[in-house]
């Protein structure tokens, strides 16, 4: 089964859903699964630590500033809606496509 990340392009940037696994053994981008980008984070889901690490990991992976990555909704959930400014949807898909499990 080929899972593809569902990306919506808006005037503000691209929007997609992220599924976060906090308290993992290592911090990594696992790739798309069931339309969401799966991330493993070492931070616990307390005091916004996992959200900060989520933003940092996406920004580092895309090679952009952290200020261009925004969690639009789901700050207290494993399923988050993220907006990334200044990135093309097709570039985003091709970058994460290689990381499929």
Image: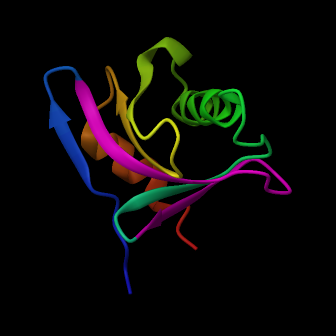
Q: Is residue 15 left or right of residue 30?
A: left
Q: Is residue 7 left or right of residue 77?
A: left
Q: Is residue 75 left or right of residue 60?
A: left
Main secondary structure along the magenta-highlighted residues: strand
User: Between residues 5 and 75, which one lies in front from this camera angle?
Assistant: 75
Q: Residue 53 is drawn in which quadrant?
A: top right
Can the viewer see residue 65 in this picture? Answer: no
Can the viewer see residue 71 in this picture? Answer: yes
Q: Is residue 70 above or below residue 81?
A: above
Q: Residue 52 is drawn in which quadrant?
A: top right
Instruction: List the single residue furthest toward the bottom.
Output: 1
Whether the magenta-drawn stretch holds residue 35 is answered as no
How many labels, in total? 0
Q: Residue 36 is drawn in which quadrant?
A: bottom left
User: Between residues 91 and 48, which one lies in front from this camera angle?
Assistant: 48
For the rendered model, the colour scheme is rainbow
Residue shown at 72% from the left, 47% from the top = 41
- Image quadrant holding the C terminus, namely bottom right
Residue shown at 71% from the left, 30% from the top = 49
User: Between residues 90 and 56, which one lies in front from this camera angle?
Assistant: 56
Residue 3 position within the rendered picture, expressed as x and y whole percent measured from the top left: 37, 73
Instruction: List the single residue furthest toward the right.
Output: 25
Residue shown at 55% from the left, 26% from the top = 63
Residue 38 position within the rendered picture, expressed as x and y whole percent measured from the top left: 54, 58
Q: Is residue 89 above or below residue 1?
A: above
Instruction: List the single residue furthest toward the left.
Output: 11
Q: Which residues are magenta?
A: 13-33
Residue shown at 51% from the left, 20% from the top = 64
- Image quadrant holding the N terminus, namely bottom left
């Amino acid at each position: 089964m080929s899972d593809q990340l569902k990306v919506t392009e808006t005037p503000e940037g691209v929007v997609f859903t992220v599924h976060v696994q906090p308290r993992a053994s290592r911090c990594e981008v696992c790739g798309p699964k069931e339309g969401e980008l799966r991330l493993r984070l070492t931070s616990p889901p307390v005091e916004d630590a996992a959200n900060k690490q989520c933003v940092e990991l996406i920004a580092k992976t895309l090679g952009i500033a952290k200020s261009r990555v925004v969690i639009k909704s789901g700050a207290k959930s494993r399923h988050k809606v993220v907006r990334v400014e200044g990135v093309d949807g097709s570039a985003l898909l091709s970058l994460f496509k290689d990381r499929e499990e």
